[in-house]
Image (tube, helix red, strand yellow):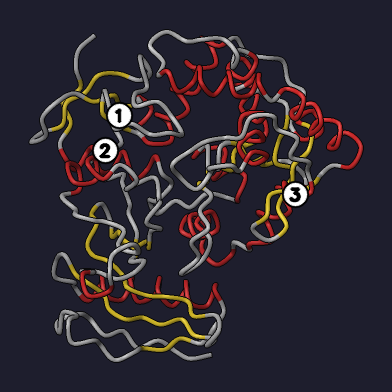
């Protein structure tokens, strides 16, 4: 099969369209999650929880956070591996769960050590299952720690026996997250949470997951970065491609070919979560968009270039800057500290981005203010005046 030759504009527009960030907005939350395959859960809420922020970016202020809570309560959407996924996708993971106890070729010795630890604490595992069967859903703190062998780690999970055992039991398909009370996970038996769809054989499930992931991303490296949530490649999904000016080979979903740099593409302005899937692979972001970005929340304030939780700004088929803003719920304010421009903004860009910032502030709810720029901020940053309501 021939290799598709794509311009950088082709590749960018394929990625944007695949992530539902072009001008044609999706109809609702379920359409968004079913297409994207997942919404990442992250506790940081400097603006809004990541899953809600990603949904707002696709749907605008018509989206209500109550929609996500309702979908999770009805188990139309489920939580698996710190991701919110369509419930029907669970069938694509059941075969791997059923085979969790079996060694896999080339795996790290860590996995066998984890399996041995679960076997050593089988009595505790059964106690947890009994408690959930009679009283679930329950938070982990209400479950008994009868582990004979403690979990040893150099990280935060050290001696968190029940929490770690629940994670492994999730991977085995025995328990599931039935919901949340605030940020606290509620656990229950998996067969009460997940739909009882037939198990898809492991090889077929991997093929379908690869296809769905590529459909959601549009174009990916033939071999990408390691990610604990998914494999670094999409195997044989899609077709081979090269991108003008970028070394290496790619896999592209053929559904998007012919829709790249043609006049059919219509972009828009969008404010992206730092965890948005359009930019989650920072190398791909740099190669296709020539855009430099790092999440700076863990840096000392004096060393930040763009802000604590700066939102990348998409305009058309380019990433054009970063918005340094924060929702201060105690003060009841949405503060715009600065807009860092990677390219000069035209009047049309400024108006479109201004509208998105105002829409975001109104969706969050607090009044909108502009704090005076700190001395270390770019004095050329655009000052956007938004209505206070």
Q: Is mark 3 on a helix, strand or loop?
A: strand
Q: Mark 1 points at which residue?
A: 257
Depth order, front residue of 145/182: 145
Within-10-Å neighbours for mark 3: few <14, some 14–19, many 20+: some
The answer to whether residue 370 shows anywhere in this view is yes
The answer to whether residue 262 shows anywhere in this view is no
The location of residue 283, given as percent across then percent down, is 22, 41
Separation (CA) of disc 2 from disc 1: 6 Å
Foreground disc of the pair 2, 3: 3
Q: Is 208 positioned to the left or the right of 28 in the image?
A: left
Separation (CA) of disc 2 from disc 3: 47 Å
Q: Mark 2 points at which residue?
A: 260
Within-10-Å neighbours for mark 1: few <14, some 14–19, many 20+: some
The location of residue 177, given as percent across then percent down, is 70, 41
Q: Do the residues labelled 2 and 1 touch (CB within 8 Å)?
A: yes
Name which of mark 2 and mark 3 comes first in the sequence. 3
The location of residue 123, given as percent across then percent down, is 77, 25
Q: Is 233 positioned to the left or the right of 332 in the image?
A: left
Q: Name the residue under label 3.
A: 139
Q: In this view, does 80 lie above or below 182?
A: above
Name, please, the residue furthest toward the front.
148
Q: What element carries label 1?
A: loop
Depth order, front residue of 313/136: 136
Q: In this view, does 311 lie above or below 151?
A: below
Q: How many labels does the image show?
A: 3
Q: Is mark 2 on a helix, strand or loop?
A: loop
Name which of mark 3 and mark 1 comes first in the sequence. 3
Residue plotted at (51% across, 66% down): 48
Separation (CA) of disc 3 from disc 1: 47 Å
Residue plotted at (54% across, 74% down): 364
Where the C terminus falls, by quadrant?
A: bottom right
């Amino acid at each position: 099969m021939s290799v598709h030759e794509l311009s950088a504009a082709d590749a960018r527009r394929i990625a944007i369209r695949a992530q539902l960030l072009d001008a044609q907005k999706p109809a609702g939350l379920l359409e968004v999650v079913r297409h994207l395959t997942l919404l990442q859960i992250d506790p940081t809420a400097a603006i809004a929880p990541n899953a809600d922020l990603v949904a707002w970016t696709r749907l605008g202020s018509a989206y209500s956070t109550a929609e996500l809570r309702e979908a999770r309560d009805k188990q139309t959407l489920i939580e698996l591996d710190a991701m919110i996924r369509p419930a029907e996708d669970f069938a694509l993971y059941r075969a791997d769960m059923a085979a969790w106890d079996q060694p896999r070729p080339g795996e790290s010795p860590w996995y066998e050590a984890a399996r041995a630890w679960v076997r050593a604490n089988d009595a505790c595992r059964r106690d947890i299952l009994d408690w959930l069967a009679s009283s679930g859903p329950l938070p982990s703190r209400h479950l008994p720690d009868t582990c004979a062998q403690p979990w040893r780690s150099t990280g935060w999970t050290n001696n968190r026996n029940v929490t770690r055992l629940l994670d492994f039991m999730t991977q085995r398909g025995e328990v599931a997250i039935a919901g949340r009370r605030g940020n606290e996970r509620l656990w229950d038996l998996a067969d009460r949470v997940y739909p009882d769809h037939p198990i898809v054989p492991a090889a077929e499930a991997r093929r379908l997951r690869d296809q769905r992931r590529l459909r959601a991303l549009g174009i990916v490296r033939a071999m990408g970065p390691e990610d604990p949530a998914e494999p670094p490649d999409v195997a044989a999904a899609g077709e081979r491609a090269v991108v003008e000016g970028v070394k290496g080979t790619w896999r592209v979903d053929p559904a998007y070919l012919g829709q790249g740099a043609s006049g059919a593409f219509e972009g828009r302005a969008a404010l992206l979560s730092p965890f948005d899937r359009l930019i989650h692979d920072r190398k791909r972001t740099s190669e296709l968009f020539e855009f430099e970005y790092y999440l700076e929340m863990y840096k000392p304030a004096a060393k930040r270039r763009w802000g604590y939780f700066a939102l990348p700004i998409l305009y058309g088929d380019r990433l054009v800057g970063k918005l340094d803003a924060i929702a201060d719920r105690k003060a009841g304010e949405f503060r715009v500290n600065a807009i860092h421009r990677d390219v000069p903004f035209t009047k049309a860009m400024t108006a479109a981005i201004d509208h998105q910032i105002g829409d975001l502030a109104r969706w969050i709810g607090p009044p909108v203010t502009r704090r005076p720029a700190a001395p270390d901020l770019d004095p050329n940053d655009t000052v956007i005046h938004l209505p206070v309501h």
